[in-house]
Image (tube, helix red, strand yellow):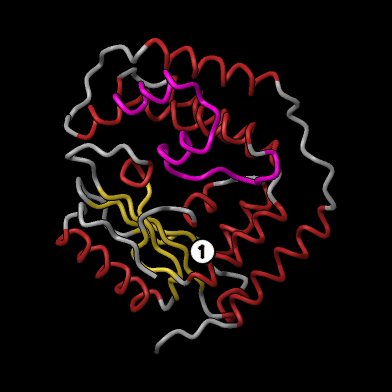
Amino acid sequence: MRAVPATLDPAVVAEIDARLSGVEATQAVHVPWAIESGSRAWGFPSPDSDYDCRFLYVRPAAHYLSLWAGRDVIETPLDEVFDVNGWDLAKAVRLLVKGNVTPVEWLRSPIVYRGDPGFRDRVLALADEVLDRAAVRRHYLHLARRQQQRTPSLKRFLYVLRPAVALRWLADHSEAAAPPMDLPTLVAESSVPADVRAAVTEVVALKSVTRELGAGDPPAVLERFVDAELDRATTQDRLARDRDLVAVRARADELFLAEVSSVRVAA
């Protein structure tokens, strides 16, 4: 599958496609999923936002049998426009078991450069089974707190706002393991008040036409919302759910081994 909006620069997209093909050819891997992350996929890009392509890859089975398997990350040259790198599926699955929601966000990105829907659905099904919601809440809480510690700006505030709305979404959807990736969907699918919705729309619209969103103060209604959501998440029970870790790891192994066994890499 492919879902690349017309708003993306075609020349940049072509270079990303070339890099992904180059990774497969030079690293002898299969890339079943490659998406856009960062502000473009989060729903609040600026005119000068760079491109943050992230991908998951799988190596042939023999690679995983070696005592010296090497790194589980592949990176391509970083510059002002391109930030293209990916994780080995083994790394992604281990992180899922630990409660890291980043692989789920990648699998749910609204911008897909290349993707096998079957692969996506299988890994998301695993995430639904093994993700610990308490750990997911902590992930978004810590993400927001880390961003709050950096130099304040309206741009930085959006990086705090998205995880804050994700926390509200999780509170509204008790049956779900992890929230959507992009801010507009999070807002639309959660119980945020109407004045918060309006303020989010206004700030996102401003960022879309401003190359450097200034250091001014964010709308007070959004600051109050963020503070309330982070405070609520801080006071919630942080204990992980009672999980059978042996069964969880067995299920993760099952998914991983099935994906690796199906890999065919061109010589």
Q: Residues within 10 Å of mark 1 (few under 14, many from 20)?
A: some
Splitting the image into 4 quarters, where does residue 161 fall?
top left
Picture quarter with the C terminus: bottom left
Q: Give whichever of 11, 192 is nearer the camera.
A: 192
> Percent x, y for residue 259?
59, 75
Q: Residue at x 31, y 60 (%)?
A: 76
Query: Up-down: is 243 above or below 219?
Result: below
Q: Residue at x 30, y 51 (%)?
A: 83
Q: Residue at x 24, y 70 (%)?
A: 18
> Percent x, y for residue 153?
30, 19
Judge left or right: residue 43 versus residue 87.
left
Query: Up-down: is 230 above or below 91?
Result: above
Question: Which kind of residue does numbered mark 1 sit on?
Answer: Asp
Q: Residue at x 34, y 71 (%)?
A: 23
Report the number of numbered marks. 1
Picture quarter with the N terminus: bottom left
Q: Is residue 184 magenta?
A: yes
Q: Which residue is mark 1?
A: 88
> Percent x, y for residue 226?
49, 19
Splitting the image into 4 quarters, where does residue 160 fall?
top left
Query: Up-down: is 179 above or below 3?
Result: above
Q: Is residue 113 magenta?
A: no
Q: Give whichever of 112, 64 is nearer the camera.
A: 112
Mark 1, secondary structure of its residue: strand
Q: Give whichever of 137, 61 is nearer the camera.
A: 137
Judge left or right: residue 201 versus residue 196.
left
The stretch in magenta equals: 174-202
Report the residue that reaches farthest toward the bottom. 267
Report the residue that reaches farthest toward the front. 194
Judge left or right: residue 145 versus residue 52.
right
> Percent x, y for residue 215?
25, 16
